[in-house]
Amino acid sequence: MPQESVAHAADPPPEGLDEPCPDGYTMDEFMTIWRDRAPMVNYTAKYTKIDSGYLGQLIEWPEVVTEGKNLEECRAMLRDALREMVLAYRHLDKETPPGNVLIEQLPVESRPTKSASRPASQPNSDRTTPLRAQPGPKHARSR
């Protein structure tokens, strides 16, 4: 079963992300300018453990998705993908999806069903034969 953890994509970026943005700004400069121009919106990231590392995706904006070899790399790449999508939407004069949603985990006990644990070759002996439609009761007409 995949392991998942939830974090906010708007958390401060990790140290050392000084690569230039498409506008020519560093990540820190871009974030400072962006914060001054627009209200802060928090997006919620979901990280799922996969064979090659981690898959990261924003809950409120599912088109923002990426993979990384480890959780830290996936977080950094997801932040970068979010930044790129914000820039693309701004360039296209499109509204970004609303963020700031409340995420709540709801635990539920999950057990395998009897049929899930039965070998495929074993017949469904614990199930009843489907009922066939029976004619309804005959009503006597009174005259």
Image: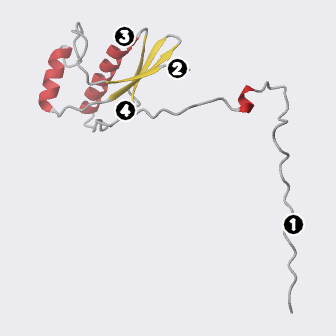
Residue at which label 4 appears: 61
Look at the picture and state if 21 lies above or below 137: above
Residue lying at the far bottom of the rendered structure:
143
Image quadrant in which the C terminus is located: bottom right
**In the image, is 32 to the left or to the right of 54?**
left
Type of colouring: secondary structure
Report the disc number at residue 135. 1
Residue shown at the point (14%, 22%) measured from the top left: 32
Binning the other alpha carbons within 10 Å of mark 1 as few (below 14), some (14 to 19) or many (20 upward) gives few
Residue lying at the far top of the rendered structure:
16
**Residue type pointed to by label 2:** Pro
Q: Position of residue 47 (x, y in %)?
A: 42, 21
Between the C-alphas of marks 2 and 1, the distance is: 51 Å
**Residue type pointed to by label 3:** Glu
Residue at which label 3 appears: 73
- The secondary element bearing badge 3 is classed as helix
Q: Where is residue 45 in the image (x, y as percent from the top left)?
A: 36, 25
N-term mark: 2 or 4:
2
Q: Position of residue 112 (x, y in %)?
A: 66, 29
Binning the other alpha carbons within 10 Å of mark 2 as few (below 14), some (14 to 19) or many (20 upward) gives few
